[in-house]
Amino acid sequence: MISSSRFLKACRREPVDVTPVWFMRQAGRYMSEYRALRERYSLLDICRSPELALEVTLQPVRRIEVDAAILFSDLLLPLEPMGLPFDFIKGEGPQLERPISSPADIDNLKTFEPREALSHVLDAIRLIQTELAGRIPLIGFAGAPFTLASYAIEGGHSSNFAKTKALMYGHPDAWHRLCERLSTLVGDYMLAQIEAGVDVVQIFDSWVGALNTADYREFALPHTRRIFETIGARVPTIHFGTGTGAILEDLRDAGGDVIGVDWRTPMDVAWDRIGSDRAVQGNLDPTLLLGPTDRMFTQTDDILARVGRRPGHIFNLGHGILPSTPVEHVQMLAQYVHSASRRTNRT
Ligand code: CP3
């Protein structure tokens, strides 16, 4: 039964034989088989084809001892059916054709039915679950309102989120209307992914660390909370962000059975703040996977020691695997987490 997998047990804070591990961006450019596929297909081609998304989802599962698969898709896919088309530009990342620049643009956004507009994602989920056949759980995902709104407004990646914050501070009513739209759509999209068969969902608020505590509570938390309320207790939920040292308790209050922790806060300090009624995920610095591996292992030992015997830890990186990471290091790390935690978890 998939519900007795060590990954889902850890989400529920039940004891496990060894610490479950998966990696954000476990599918991607650091793998030669992914790069080979990308020579023939664009990222959007892969996201829009259930067969290609299936193949890329399984690439890391075949090579690395991971305890969960993550649907291969992208956070930005819901933007297009809202009327915000975009493309991925080589070396630069995502680029929107016409980013939101005024309150009027927000009122002109479209709503959509994810079971129609994003049916290819749901088809991919069904294919992946047939292929995984209950061996490991499948994680579905979407973006949180702040992070999605930042792409919709900046038009791509930003280092200071100046346009996003200018709209947020200058037109708070319009900001809240935008985030209400996003939380309704994302909540419904998550329900559609759950109906299609994902076992867990992760909400990515990757850039929310750009907000101070008071602004997080005013401009982001209520909208993210609505998504978690919509999902309810259907499947375990993971709430992830980076640079969240000032808002860990608030991130927890917004929701999530598992709270993601980046590498900036030691795991025991973070978990004490989050509280023992939640599981945690993290928190190795992805840069340590570039080598030398002895430092990667030492830091992994440190994380496992800080967790100790508390049930409810999912090992992951503080953010995604970097494209220049040697695949062997990822393989070694997953094995290491399993073998090192077997010693600590033995009672
Ligand atoms: O293995 C997995 O983790 C699943 C696949 C996945 C992708 N995007 C595929 C992808 C996931 C979970 C995402 C989520 C995503 N997308 C996030 C949140 C996660 C995070 O890292 O914080 C964000 C912010 C995006 C938006 C996005 N997509 C950006 C900013 C970029 C360009 C940055 C880059 O690395 O080039 C992408 C492109 C993207 N999405 C890639 C992958 C594997 C890059 C690979 C490629 O171009 O082929």
Image (spheres, rainbow, N blue to C red):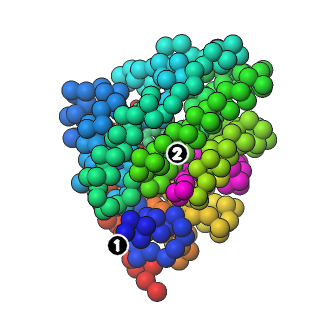
Q: In which quarter of the image is the N terminus?
A: bottom left
User: Dot 1: within a 10 Å radius of its alpha carbon, few (fewer than 14), some, or many (20 or more) residues?
Assistant: few
Say which residue appears at 32% left-offset and 61% top-offset: 134
User: Dot 2: within a 10 Å radius of its alpha carbon, few (fewer than 14), some, or many (20 or more) residues?
Assistant: many
Q: Name the residue under label 1.
A: 339
Q: Position of residue 271 (x, y in %)?
A: 63, 64
> Which residue is more in the foreground, 192 or 252?
192
Say which residue appears at 20% left-offset and 34% top-offset: 36
- Magenta stretch: give its range: 234-254
Q: Is mark 2 within 8 Å of ligand 1?
A: no
> Which residue is more in the foreground, 295 or 69?
69
The amino acid marked with disc number 2 is Leu
Say which residue appears at 44% left-offset and 74% top-offset: 16
Judge whether residue 204 can be spotted in this image: no
Q: Residue 116 carries which label?
A: none
Of labels 1 and 2, the one closer to you: 2
Q: Is residue 89 above or below residue 295?
A: above
Q: Position of residue 283 (x, y in %)?
A: 51, 56
The answer to which quarter of the image holds residue 88 is top left
| Mark 1 vs mark 2, CA separation in Å | 36 Å
- Ligand 1 - quadrant of the structure image: top left
Q: Position of residue 28 (x, y in %)?
A: 33, 40
The answer to which quarter of the image holds residue 216 is top right
Name which of mark 1 and mark 2 comes first in the sequence.
2
Q: Which SS class for mark 1?
A: helix
Q: Where is residue 101 in the image (x, y as percent from the top left)?
A: 64, 14
Judge whether residue 123 can be spotted in this image: yes
Q: Which SS class for mark 2?
A: helix
Q: Mark 2 points at which residue?
A: 191
